Image (cartoon, rainbow, N blue to C red):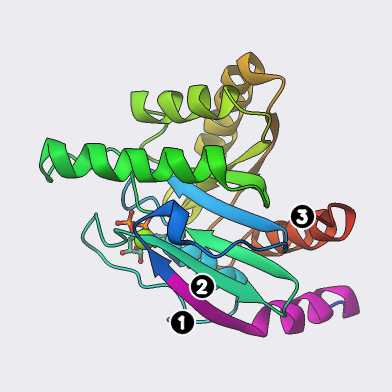
């Protein structure tokens, strides 16, 4: 393993759970650069946090969608926060519950001042859905930057990943002010995780709040 990658691995391995919140106003004000993971239910948000932090159970994951129902904050090395958000678009919960989770996610994205980057996760096999476009639109109303992470690429052929990635990039061109780039990742096979770690690490150095 190259020395830089080993240093990143050690950096992200120093982590701890800060807290779980169902009200954005209750989250403690914090000056550390914060990075969040958002996306449809079951897309792999909690899994990618575990992959990034070299942990098996820092964030709770589940085979059944709708596992994460609150905002969960984690600290890395006293330098960075990572945020695991509930999933949107899960059909098998009541409309009231769905609406309240959507408001919680929106409230966090719009009002969290130290949030410097939003990672929007899209399941490679499933592709983009209307709820994802709604999320892009919501971010478009802010000055925040987002990147797309195409997840679970271990389940798709190389060509399929390439096509999904290209079509997402052309769609994201509609969000020039906010969209930055796309990553192709598998948390289970540890593919592309190092690129996300590098991105977060470099952004945190250049964006001291
Ligand atoms: N094949 C494969 N499966 C994955 C990958 N990442 C996550 N999964 C599986 O997808 C399921 C959902 O993962 P989670 O990380 O809980 O997804 P989530 O987005 O946090 O889900 P909610 O909290 O319910 O919104 C689990 O069964 C994971 O093992 C991946 O890279 N490849
Ligand atoms: Mg989750």
Residue hosting label 2 = 50
Note whether residue 190 is visible: yes
> Would you say 114 lies left or right of 56 here?
right
**Residues in magenta, as a range:** 3-19
Dominant secondary structure, magenta:
helix
Please tell me the numbered disc located at residue 199.
3
> Would you say 205 lies left or right of 186 here?
right
Q: Secondary structure at mark 2?
A: helix
Residue hosting label 1 = 56
> In x, y percent, where is residue 111?
55, 42
Q: Residue at x 79, y 63 (%)?
A: 201
CB within 8 Å, label 1 to label 3: no
Gap between marks 3 and 2 measured at Cα: 16 Å
Gap between marks 1 and 2 measured at Cα: 6 Å
| For residue 74, above or below residue 97 | below
Q: Nearer the viewer, residue 72 or 9?
A: 72
Quarter where residue 161 is shown: top right
> In x, y percent, where is residue 141?
57, 22
Cβ of mark 2 under 8 Å from ligand 1: the answer is: yes
CB within 8 Å, label 1 to label 2: yes
Quarter where residue 10 is shown: bottom right
> Would you say 41 lies left or right of 25 here?
left
> Would you say 82 lies left or right of 1 here?
left
> In x, y percent, where is residue 84?
47, 60
Farthest residue, direction top: 174
Please tell me the numbered disc located at residue 74.
none
Q: Nearer the viewer, residue 185 or 37?
A: 37
Q: Secondary structure at mark 3?
A: helix
Q: Secondary structure at mark 1?
A: loop
Gap between marks 1 and 3 measured at Cα: 22 Å
Nearer the N terminus, badge 1 or badge 3? 1
């Amino acid at each position: 393993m190259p020395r830089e990658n080993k240093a990143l691995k050690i950096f992200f391995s120093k982590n701890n759970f800060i807290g779980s919140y169902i009200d954005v106003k209750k989250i403690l004000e914090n000056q550390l650069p914060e990075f969040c993971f958002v996306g449809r239910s079951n897309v792999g948000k909690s899994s990618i946090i575990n992959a990034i932090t070299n942990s098996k159970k820092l964030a709770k994951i589940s085979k059944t969608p709708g596992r994460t129902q609150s905002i969960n904050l984690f600290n890395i090395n006293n330098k960075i926060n990572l945020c695991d958000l509930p999933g949107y678009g899960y059909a098998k919960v009541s409309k009231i519950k769905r609406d309240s989770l959507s408001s919680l996610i929106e409230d966090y994205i719009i009002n969290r001042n130290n949030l410097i980057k939003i990672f929007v996760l899209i399941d490679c096999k499933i592709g983009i859905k209307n709820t994802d476009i709604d999320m892009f639109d919501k971010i478009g109303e802010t000055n925040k930057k987002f990147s797309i992470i195409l997840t679970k690429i271990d389940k798709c052929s190389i060509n399929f990943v390439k096509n999904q990635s290209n079509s997402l990039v052309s769609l994201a061109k509609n969000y020039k002010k906010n969209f930055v780039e796309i990553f192709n990742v598998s948390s289970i096979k540890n593919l592309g995780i190092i690129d996300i770690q590098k991105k977060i690490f470099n952004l945190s150095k250049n964006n001291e709040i």
